[in-house]
Image: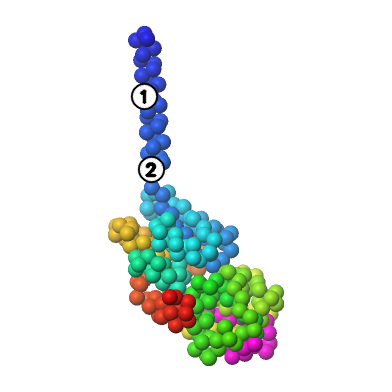
């Protein structure tokens, strides 16, 4: 091989090596992954995730991806097995994830609204005015693992001496809060229980007529949703994430958009002890072993 050809071959080999190295670096670039319980339609969850992804990428300095899951149990497993870095849980799914991970689920922040969250019972039946009136009726909850769509409504029913498994004609599970509204509005069930925030959004967006589908009972307040990470996440990353959420405010276009999509006034710090009441309710209702 002539010196000229050798030089060309060497440059070609060097360029190829650099390209392979660049691909290797690109392949190893860290990606922050988060998920959320599917308590609303997949299209709505994706819509809510978009602006948050862009914001977190700017605050974390890395690529961020939203990983949808098919059901509540999948979100618990995803965090417990560290397939995602962060999850949007309801209070009960947080408790389940904490149990499943051996106490390694760390709730970082919650919406201010989640400190005093509520559920509502809705109906189109004029004869239903109290929880006791649900005896002998068909009633829909959301997902079996939903805090605001099942666990807490069930807990308050039991407090009112109404046992869904014995007193209802039929118990249905719609899978999501919006699906519960649709089932009640269509007359598929006599009544339903769901997240008060979703109900208010549907009324505000005129997706339901409150003169036809009405709220007949609102629960007392309880702690609910939060953003949770695994305890193995470095403390510095946990602090960076918390600060990113706590810094959101409606005085900036970015903050306003994200907070409105999340149906939040602002985010506040939270802790595992806030969910002891939900854990107790879960055990009392036989939904947590």
Q: Nearer the viewer, residue 250 or 191?
A: 191
Residue 220 sits above or below residue 263 on the image = below
**Crowding near pointer 2: few (<14 within 10 Å), some, many (20+)?**
few
Q: Label 2, label 1: how many angstroms apart (C-alpha)?
A: 21 Å
Instruction: Kindly state the secondary structure of the residue where label 1 is placed.
Output: helix
- Farthest top residue? 2
Give x and y (percent) for residue 240: 33, 58
Quarter of the picture containing the C terminus is bottom left
105 relative to 76 in the view: left or right: left
One can see residue 179 in this view: yes
Answer with the quarter of the image where residue 86 lies: bottom left
Q: Is residue 168 left or right of residue 226?
A: right
Where on the picture, by quarter, is residue 139? bottom right
The residue that appears at 59% across and 73% down in the rendered structure is: 173
Q: Which residues are the magenta region?
A: 117-136
Which of these two is toward me, 284 or 262?
Answer: 284
| Residue drawn at (55%, 89%) of the image | 162
- In the image, what residue occupies the spot 65% across and 87% down? 136
Q: Which residue is mark 1?
A: 14
Q: Earlier in the sequence, mark 2 or mark 1?
A: 1
Tell me where residue 191 appears, x and y as whole percent: 63, 81
On the image, which quarter does residue 266 sit in?
bottom left
Residue most extreme to the left? 235
Q: Is residue 242 left or right of residue 42?
A: left
Residue that numbered label 2 is attached to:
28
99 inside magenta stretch: no
In which quadrant is the N terminus drawn? top left
């Amino acid at each position: 091989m002539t010196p000229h050809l050798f030089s060309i071959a060497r440059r070609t080999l060097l360029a190829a090596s650099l390209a392979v190295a660049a691909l290797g670096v690109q392949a190893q670039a860290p990606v922050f992954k988060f998920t959320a319980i599917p308590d609303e339609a997949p299209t709505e969850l994706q819509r809510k995730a978009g602006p948050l992804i862009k914001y977190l990428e700017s605050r974390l300095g890395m690529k961020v991806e939203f990983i949808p899951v098919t059901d509540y149990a999948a979100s618990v497993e995803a965090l417990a097995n560290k397939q995602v870095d962060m999850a949007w849980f309801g209070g009960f799914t947080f408790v389940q994830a904490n149990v499943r991970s051996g106490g390694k689920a760390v709730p970082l922040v919650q919406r201010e609204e989640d400190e005093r969250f509520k559920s509502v019972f809705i109906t189109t039946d004029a004869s239903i005015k109290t929880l006791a009136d649900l005896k002998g009726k068909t009633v829909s909850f959301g997902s079996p693992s939903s805090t605001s769509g099942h666990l807490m409504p069930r807990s308050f029913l039991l407090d009112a001496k109404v046992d869904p498994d014995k007193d209802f004609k039929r118990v249905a599970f719609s899978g999501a809060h919006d699906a519960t509204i649709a089932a009640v509005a269509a007359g598929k069930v006599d009544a339903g229980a769901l997240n008060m925030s979703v109900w208010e959004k549907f009324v505000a967006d005129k997706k339901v007529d409150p003169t036809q589908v009405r709220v007949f009972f609102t629960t007392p307040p309880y702690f609910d949703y939060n953003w949770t990470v695994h305890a193995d996440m470095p403390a510095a990353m946990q602090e960076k994430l918390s600060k990113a959420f706590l810094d959101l405010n409606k005085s900036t276009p970015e903050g306003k958009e994200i907070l409105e999509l999340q149906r939040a006034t602002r985010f506040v710090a939270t802790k595992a002890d806030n969910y002891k009441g939900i854990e107790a309710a879960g055990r009392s209702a036989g939904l947590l072993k």
